[in-house]
Image (tube, rainbow, N blue to C red):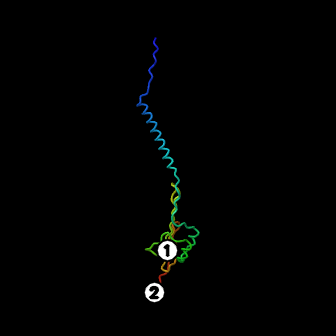
Amino acid sequence: MTNVMPPVMIPSMNAVKSRSALKQSSLKMLLLIAVGMLLGCVYRIDIQQGNFLEPKDVDRVAVGMTRVQVRALLGTPMVADPFENGRWDYVYYLKKGRWRKAEQRHFIVFFDALEKVNRIDRSDKPSITVDTPPANPA
């Protein structure tokens, strides 16, 4: 009896290269997924724009106030329309994070020819209007 050893299987160079390439591509894919997941967790800062108005200050604005009184109470308006001198817009926008809905408020003050408030529009309440009598032609 001859002592015959079974043939030893030596992997070919192509098989070694393909395993190495498979490991590299798997590692790249895993790294790409990890980076993608980390980018999805980025903190988003709050975005606040416009005039933040306290509700108590807005409630104090009344029909008949002058421009100076309104500016002293609420500050300079966000939008003072150069084409319509009798209107001031106070706009506020707040976006918290990525997923929350943005909060928007719009407060408009209308002035008459005597530079006094004659109408107030609020985004959260119905508008307040005063009927001014027509000027008597003298």
Q: Residues within 10 Å of mark 2 (few under 14, many from 20)?
A: few
Q: Is residue 51 above or below residue 27?
A: below
What residue is shown with label 1? 110
Q: Type of residue at label 1?
A: Phe
For the residues marked 2 and 1, what is the alpha-carbon distance in whole angstroms?
24 Å
Q: How many marks?
A: 2
What residue is shown with label 2? 137
64 and 39: which is toward the camera: 39
Q: Is residue 125 left or right of residue 11?
A: right
Provide residue 32's location: percent of width, then percent of height.
47, 44
Q: Secondary structure at mark 2?
A: loop
**Residue sitting at the far top:** 1
Provide residue 110's location: percent of width, then percent of height.
49, 74
**Image point 45% across, 16% down: which residue?**
4
| Quarter of the view holding residue 56 | bottom right
**Image point 52% across, 51% down: which residue?**
42
24 and 80: which is toward the camera: 24
74 and 124: which is toward the camera: 74
**N-terminal of the two: label 2 or label 1?**
1
**Residue sitting at the far front:** 13
Q: Residues within 10 Å of mark 1 (few under 14, many from 20)?
A: many
**Image point 45% across, 35% down: which residue?**
20
**Image point 44% across, 25% down: which residue?**
10
Q: Are marks 2 and 1 in contact (CB under 8 Å)?
A: no
Provide residue 62's location: percent of width, then percent of height.
55, 74
Q: Type of residue at label 2?
A: Pro
